[in-house]
Image (cartoon, helix red, strand yellow):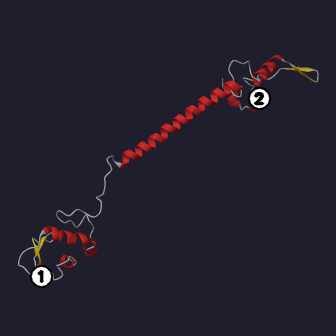
Amino acid sequence: MVAFSMRKVPNRETTEISHVLLCNVTQRVSFWFVVTDPSKNHTLPAVEIQSAIRMNRNRINNAFFLNDQTLEFLRIPSTLAPPTDPPVPIWIIIFGVIFCIVIVATMLLILSGIQQHRRCQSFSLCAFRKNEGPSEMEDTEDKCENTITIENGIPCDPLDMKGGHINDAFMTEDERLTPL
């Protein structure tokens, strides 16, 4: 690939694979290389090799299924932008969003309660009225306690609305003897 890249540079069309020398080859495909000039017996300048590789970097990456993170040339900046890490961890961002939603929901509930209370005071629409006399239900209970009904000419005692009466017909023997 390096020889191919060098052939694309003007005045270097005669570069062959034998002109690329690999040095310090390891099993992890880590090495450094030099390119020699075919006409003269010396190495080519690094700037010229870097420009040739830069022009064909995508071919080199695609040939070995590499990306800019796995294939790195010394003093050649990567063509892709490096991955960015957020300055704040992701879980803190998610926690902050959820916390803000809870705060906003709480504030809405409080404000709607205050608004309903004000509306209730100004229009007297509230079910729980303050500073008023007894309600209709309380009035009827008071009236029932004071009245004695007469049925078929016989006066009947009113039922105790608050306490109620126990019907002895439905009580068992044990319940009659058990004190309340």
Q: Is residue 52 left or right of residue 170?
A: left
Helix, strand or loop status at disc 2: loop
Helix, strand or loop status at disc 1: helix
User: What residue sits 37% from the left and 47% below the top?
Assistant: 91
- Discs 1/2, front: 1
> Could you tell me the amino acid type at mark 1?
Ser
> Could you tell me the amino acid type at mark 2?
Asn
The answer to which quarter of the image holds residue 6 is bottom left
- What x and y, as percent, mark residue 41? 5, 78
- What x and y, as percent, mark residue 119? 66, 28
Considering every residue shown, the one lying at the far left of the view is 41
State the residue in front, 166 or 100.
100
In the picture, the disc for residue 167 is 2
- Is residue 29 in view from this perspective? no
Q: Is residue 171 left or right of residue 57?
A: right
Q: Is residue 123 above or below residue 72?
A: above
- Quarter that holds the C terminus: top right
In the picture, the disc for residue 18 is 1
Q: How many marks?
A: 2
The answer to which quarter of the image holds residue 148 is top right
The answer to which quarter of the image holds residue 71 is bottom left
